[in-house]
Image: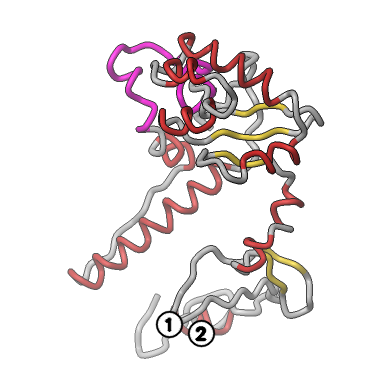
Amino acid sequence: LAGVVSLNEGQDGLPAMPAMPVADALGSLTALSGVLMALLRKRETGQGDYLDVAMFDSVMAWTPNVTGRIFATGQAHVVKDERSWGGNAMYGLYRTADQRWLALGGAEVKFARNLLTPLGREDLVRCAGLPPGPGQEPLRVFLRETFAGRTLAEWQTWFADKDVCWAPVRTLKEAFDDPALVEREMLAQDADGYEIVGTPIRFREEPAVIDPTVPSLDGHGADIRARLGCSAVGGWGPRSGGGR
């Protein structure tokens, strides 16, 4: 590993463990993209290619939206002041009275106005228009105190008719119980009836069929060897007068 990038720093200034294996996922998606591009090159030119894909490179390739400060000033981020990491009051996490959490995800001033006007603090809309960082602290303080005054369920009812980008912070179990996720078939079953994660890619002409079955030892060996021109396990054989 080339090192850990401290973009997962919390508001307390301490690094936080990411919830998912980001490097693994991005590395595999980057590799898939490269394979598809190489296949396109093969189809168009008759020449394939060789791919060199690293997980660290893949993660760094996903950072352009936050590299401005580094490239412009040569200085590291003050993470808690950045828009995506809590510096914007309308783009953050807030604890509710029942020790649950809700997330605000729309930093546009119109959403701040739609939130603050019914709360009687339209004067704080100006803070939402300031750059992320210390200037928005009065708004963050107000939202922390306000959201702590009701339960998550009460806030869900309150937000029902408000045009504000927000969401309850759920457990993974609650997420899989969501009716929308079930309708999208992201909670599927395998041939034996066990629950599995569905596919997020929806093909119209050729719907995906998930087969999580683990093949037996050398289960696909004969087919692979036949396609590669290997006559038997342990060596290459002359299939059409060829050698290795």
Q: In this orientation, which residue lies closer to the viewer: 92 or 205?
A: 92
* Residue 62 forms part of the magenta stretch: no
Above or below: residue 201 compared with residue 234: above
Q: Residue at x 19, y 70 (%)?
A: 44
Q: In the rendered view, does 5 fall on the left or right side of 12?
A: left
- Where residue 140 appears, as percent x and y from the top left, is 57, 17
Three-letter code for the amino acid on which mark 2 is drawn? Ser
Give the SS element for disc 2.
loop
Q: In this orientation, which residue lies closer to the viewer: 134 or 63?
A: 134
Neighbor class of circle 1 (other Cα within 10 Å; few <14, some 14-19, many 20+) is few
What range of the chain is rendered magenta?
64-87
- Where residue 212 appears, as percent x and y from the top left, is 67, 71
Dominant SS type (magenta): helix
Q: In the rendered view, does 170 fall on the left or right side of 55?
A: right
* Residue 69 forms part of the magenta stretch: yes
Residue ID for mark 2:
231
Q: Residue at x 43, y 41 (%)?
A: 58
Residue ID for mark 1:
205
Q: Quadrant of the N terminus?
A: top right
- Where residue 173 appears, as percent x and y from the top left, is 76, 52
Above or below: residue 232 compared with residue 200: below
Q: Quadrant of the C terminus?
A: bottom left
Residue 210 visible in this rendered orientation of the protein: yes
Q: Residue furthest left?
A: 45
